Amino acid sequence: MAKDRMKRIGIDKKSGKVTKHKGKVSEQLQPYLNPQESGNKCDVRWMKIEDQYGNGIKITGDPTVEINAIPYTPFELEEASHHYKLPVSDKVSVRVNGWQTGVGGDDSWGQHAHTEYRLAANQNYSYRFTIEGLSK
């Protein structure tokens, strides 16, 4: 796939300048009407996930990746019809992607993403990242 097309993948989800995000994993899940994956960050150079003692992991993109970290698995999100039905969680579910297909077309009620924002199923994609353990 051409490099210029890869730069456009997911562009309809990008809305800000390069910045340093800081927050709790529990704050990354957005309260949409139905529970669903959320909190994805694009063009991530590195991300640390640490407990209160400084133990955790650091994920570094080569050069960048997309990452989300939320307290629920995809299965738990799919099984809960409302946020109050999600189980109490003491875990972190991390997803590292090279790119994602854009979120939609010209409306928010079912249109597919425009072709230039889609990842083709018949293409091979590759991306690199490293994970290192952190301990204090």
Image (tube, grey):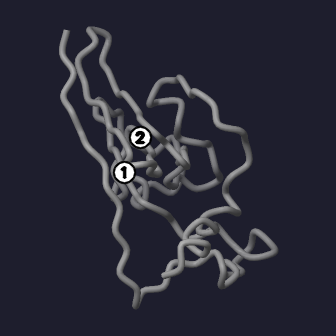
In this view, the residue in front, 7 or 131, is: 7
Give the side of residue 99 with respect to residue 57, left or right. Answer: right
Location of mark 2 (residue): 69
Q: Quadrant of residue 118?
A: bottom right
Residue 73 percent across, percent down from the top left: 33, 50
Element under disc 2: strand
Q: What is the three-letter code of the residue carrying label 2?
A: Ala
Precedes in sequence: disc 1 or disc 2:
2
In the rendered image, the residue lying farthest to the right is 106
Q: What is the three-letter code of the residue carrying label 1?
A: Arg
Residue 29 percent across, percent down from the top left: 53, 41
Q: Quadrant of residue 71?
A: top left
Q: Quadrant of the C terminus?
A: top left
Would you place residue 133 above or below residue 76 in this image?
above
Residue 36 percent across, percent down from the top left: 51, 55
Q: In the drawing, what numbered circle is on residue 10? A: none
Label 1, residues with CA under 10 Å away: few <14, some 14-19, many ≥20: few
Kindly identify the residue that appears in the image at 43 percent across and 48 percent down.
63
Residue 30 percent across, percent down from the top left: 60, 42
Kindly identify the residue that appears in the image at 41 percent across and 33 percent down.
47
Q: In the drawing, what numbered circle is on residue 95? A: 1
User: Are the residues flagged by discs 1 and 2 in contact, CB closer than 8 Å?
Assistant: yes
